[in-house]
Amino acid sequence: MNNTYFLNLDEIHIPIIIKDVLKNFWLAILAVISVCIFVFAYRTLVYQSTYTTETTFVISPKSNGSYVSFYASLNTANEMAEVFQEVFTSDVLKRMILEDLDEPNLNFSVSCSVAKGTNILCVYTNANTPVQSHMAMQSLLNNYREVSGYLFGGVVLDILKTPQIPISPSNPPNIRRMMLIGSFIAIVFMLCLVVLFSILRPTVKTIQSAKRHLGESPLGVLYKEERPLHWLRRESKKAPLITDAGISFQYTETVLKFTHKLQHKMSKNNQKVLLVTSVAENEGKSAISANLALALAEHGYKVALVDMDLRRPAIYKIFRRHSKIDLFSCFSTELPESLDGPDKLHILCSRKPCTDISKILHSPELFKLLDMLRQKMDYIIMDSSPYTVAADTGILLQHADGCVLVVRQDWAPHKVCSDVAEDLDTSKADYLGYIYNHYQEKRFINQPKRYYRKYGYYDTRHVEEQ
C-alpha cells in the first residue's frame, strides 16, 4: 500500500462537497457579518466627508476698454482659461485665503477645470464642512484679483454661477453597494475555501479511493440508510438493523451478502471467533457487529454477540428490547443455562463502562469464557474498541480467529486506514477484509436504491401472493 497521496478525480465526491458547504455555510454568514462590521467601521472611523462649493467663470479678453466678441476671441480666451487654473490653485492664493479667514489650520483645497473648446472655467473649493468650503470660495472670489491682476490685466472674469453652500458631501459613501459587493465576494471566497478543503481532505470518500488506499475491494458497501420522514427523531438515531420493519431491501441484501462471504471464509479455516473493529469512533462497527450476528442467526447458526468495547459499550443500546446476559457476571459465575436454549442469538454485554479494563483483558476468566463459548456456539462476534483509540483491540486479536475492519466514508484519514489495515493483516488473527460503511452515492449519476426498492417490494408481494 502506497503512502504517497495524489489527488485523483475519482476521489471527488459531489454529495460530500454539498454536505460540507451546507454544514459550513455559517462561515459564509460570518464572513458577511464581518464585511458589514468592516464597512460600518470604515464609515465611522476612516471615512472623511468632503463638501465642494462650485463657481463658474467666463473669461473674456478686452481691447481698448471694450469687450471683444466672444466668438472672435474664443481660442485666445480658452488658452487664458487654462493658464488661470494655475492661478487659482497656486500656493500664493491659498495663503491669502488662510490669512483672510484667519484660520491657519483650515484644511481645504482648490481645483479647476476648463470646459473643452470653451472659455468657461469651473473652480471648486473642497473642505471638511459645508461652511468651510463656502467660506473658502468667498475668500477666493475676494482675493483672486490681487494675484491675477498683475499677470492678466487685459482679461475679464465674469461669474456665470454664484457659489452656494453645499448641502451634501461630494464623496458620499455608497454603503449599500459596498455591502453587496463585499458580501458577494466574502460568500464566494468562503464557499470556494470550503470546497477546496473538502476536495483536499485526505479521507476515504469513494469506493475507488477505498480500493486504492486499502489495497483490495471491500467485503461490502453499506449505503447510508435514510429513514422515512414519519419516523420519530429518537428512532432515526437508532442503529439500523436488518430485522427492523422500515429497513430498506438494499441494506438488508448488502448485510446478507458480506455475511455470507465472511461465513464462507471462516468455515474454510474452521474459524469461530470474529473480531469487528474500526479505525476511529462513530464509524458504525457496533451496528455492523449486531447485523452480522442477526444474519448468521437467521441462517440457523447459534451466535454469541459479545460487547468487548469496555470503554464505551453500545450493544445494549442497539438491542433494547432483546434479552441480554450481563458480561461481567459471566466472569465470576458459570455461563447461564439460557445459552443451551433454542434461541439462536445470545447477547453478552454490559451497560456501564469498565473501570479496570487491563485486568479483565488479561484475566484467565476471559480465556475461560471464550473457550466455553467456542464449545456452545457456532460463531462468536466480538465488538471491540476502535483500533486507534485504545490498545484493547490489539489484546483481543490474540483471542480471535479472524477480524474485520469497518471504514466509514469521509471519516478517518486514508493514511490511518491503510496503517490499521496493515496492522490487522500482520496480527495473529486472520484479516478477512473491510466493510465500507455509511456510503452516500451520487444519485444524479446512478440511482440503484430505486431499483432495489422496487425489487424488494415485488419480491415481498410475490411471496405473499404465493
Image: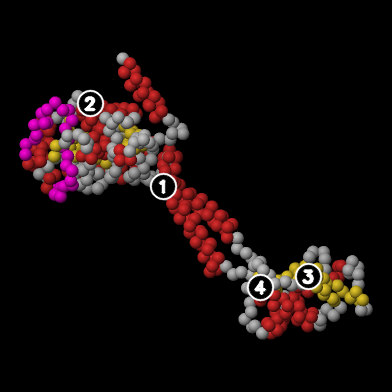
- Disc 3 from disc 2: Cα separation: 100 Å
Circle number at residue 23: 1
Q: Amino acid at mark 4?
A: Pro
- Disc 4 from disc 1: Cα separation: 51 Å
- Disc 1 from disc 2: Cα separation: 40 Å
- Disc 4 from disc 2: Cα separation: 90 Å
Q: Reading the chain from its start, which is encountered first: label 4 or label 2?
A: 4
- The residue wearing badge 4 is 130
Question: Comparing marks 4 and 2, which lies closer to the viewer?
Answer: 4
Q: Which percent across, then down, holds residue 220?
A: 31, 32
Residue at 8%, 31% (x, y): give it: 337
Residue at 54%, 52% (x, y): give it: 184
Pick whichever, 121 or 216, lies toward us. 121
Is residue 338 on the magenta stretch? yes
Q: Amino acid at mark 2?
A: Glu
Pick whichever, 118 or 235, lies toward us. 235
Question: Comparing marks 4 and 1, which lies closer to the viewer?
Answer: 4
Q: Which region of the structure is painted magenta?
A: 333-358
Instruction: Give the quadrant of residue 111.
Output: bottom right
Which image quarter holds the C terminus? top left
Total tally of numbered discs in the picture: 4
